[in-house]
Image (cartoon, helix red, strand yellow):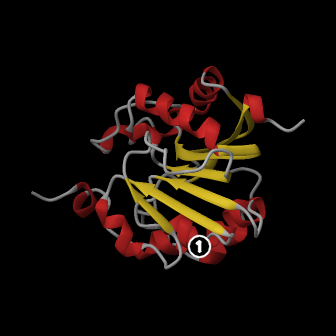
Amino acid sequence: MKSYHETRLAYDERRNLLWKTLCESYFQRLVGSDDCVLELGAGYGHFINHIRCKRRIAVDAWRGMEEYLQPGIESHICSVTELGMVDDESVDFAFASNLFEHLTQTEFAQTLQGLRTKLKRGGTLNILQPNYRFAYREYFDDYTHVAVYSDRSLADFLSVNGFEVKECHARFLPLTVKSRMPVSAALIRLYLAMPVKPMGKQMLLRAVPRDRAVA
């Protein structure tokens, strides 16, 4: 039988270009050179391969991840609910892209509980994923989606699990690179700079553990 990564999420070089540009033009300014970055559900490593910092950690249950990671990235093949291998208060920037809609709410809550102890004081959890308010027509085209979140419900879920939302961008990116529109670094940078995001169906939320927030 074919796997999810062979059918729904086959490798696509356009995603690599997208993430290279997103890291260079947006996310890198949020990460310091001496920081530790943890990516949950790293998949093909598109984000963690392009972010620059002192320590990079990638976690995914998919064993194929390791062949796509650059040298020097620490890899752990396990569930994101199992973060015992990460030292407490060691992570500056935790990142998850298109992950939590694939987990049950119980698994999501367990992941958040584990992250609260792994983040340093002032460390952030950064979540990018489909916003159901704008992507409801396509949301369940992916048969592995088991949970539904909008920018509002995700913010509430983070809050009841001990996180304080610092930024919420309801329309951060289009839903997918699978379209007739060209994927180019120039167009991506232009889109990021636009105050209004047409076709924006993915949200970005940045949050900190409430007991580790910096005033």
Vertical arrangement, residue 33 with respect to residue 112, above or below: below
Q: Nearer the viewer, residue 105 or 10?
A: 105
Q: Nearer the viewer, residue 118 or 60?
A: 118
Q: Residue at x 55, y 65 (%)?
A: 47
Image position of 28 (left or right of 185)? right
Image position of 168 (left or right of 75)? right
| Residue extending furthest toward the top | 160
Q: Which quadrant of the view contains residue 102?
A: top left
Task: Please tell me whether mark 1 sits on a helix, a strand or a loop.
Answer: helix
Vertical arrangement, residue 21 with respect to residue 85, above or below: below
| Residue 109, percent from left and from top | 50, 28
| Residue 136, percent from left and from top | 44, 35
- Does residue 201 show up? no
| Residue 167, percent from left and from top | 75, 40
Q: Residue at x 23, y 59 (%)?
A: 7
Q: Which residue is mark 1?
A: 50
Quadrant where the N terminus lies? bottom left
Quadrant where the C terminus lies? top right
- Amino acid on which disc 1 is placed: His
Vertical arrangement, residue 15 with respect to residue 60, above or below: below
| Residue 189, percent from left and from top | 69, 69
Count of number-bearing discs: 1
Crowding near the residue tagged with mark 1, few <14, some 14–19, many ≥20 C-alpha atoms within 10 Å: some
| Residue extending furthest toward the right | 215
- Does residue 97 show up? yes
| Residue extending furthest toward the left | 1
Q: Nearer the viewer, residue 132 or 48?
A: 48
Vertical arrangement, residue 169 with respect to residue 164, above or below: below
